[in-house]
Image (cartoon, helix red, strand yellow):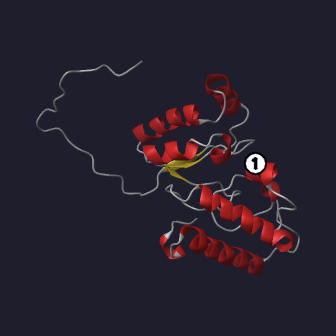
Amino acid sequence: MPVARHAALSVPLGTRLMDKPAVQYRGIFLNDEAPALTNWAKERFGGYNRKFYEQLFELMLRMRANYLWPAMWGSAFYDDDKGNGELADRMGIVMGTSHHEPMMRAHQEWLRHGKGPWDYSRNADTLRAFWAQGLRNTRDHEKVITMAMRGDGDEPMSESANVELLERIVRDQRSLIKQELKRDPATVPQL
């Protein structure tokens, strides 16, 4: 039901105001969203598009949340609807990506546009180019960048994946942040 319009609004004396939340990023991860939420979003809005996210963002703001890891099963926030990122930014929602989706790229985008194995020890150049595009796609939007990497489908990247490889991945990702965002990586929110 739409909000009723009034010619004037007044606030009684003695009204208590709540201070801002003590935590900077307060949000949710739309995890294990299929089939229930996915089917509902398709039936009601045509999918995980700006019509769906506008409703979700309004709900989040009413609950004083401001941070979202979007739906990921078969969907890609920035690729499915090019207006999703702009909408989030306009509504004050800080975007992130899941534990399995580094550098502002959905895993679904890798399935659609990536080439070769999802394995940094064998495909580093291609993965860096893929991640650089994720940073360019979200350059003007407020975000928390998920760092590092894990294997496809929450599996290990390889039998030999080790701390040294993960340290190299994070070093390379921070270099991409500096290169693509033209900022000191220490000033960019990362997870």
Q: Residue furthest bottom?
A: 164
Q: Quadrant of residue 151?
A: bottom right
Quadrant occupied by the C terminus? bottom right
Q: Residue at x 65, y 43 (%)?
A: 71
Image location of residue 182, percent across then percent down: 53, 72
Give the labeled residue for mark 1: 108
- Can residue 177 be spotted in the picture? yes
Specify the amino acid type for callout 1. Answer: Gln
Quadrant occupied by the N terminus? top left
User: Label 1: few (<14), some or many (≥20) within 10 Å?
Assistant: some
Q: Residue at x 47, y 35 (%)?
A: 59
Image-based side of 22 in relation to 123, left or right: left
Relative to 26, residue 15 above or below: above
Relative to 64, residue 49 above or below: above
Q: Residue at x 61, y 26 (%)?
A: 45
Nearest the eye: 179 or 98? 179
Image location of residue 54, percent across then percent down: 51, 35
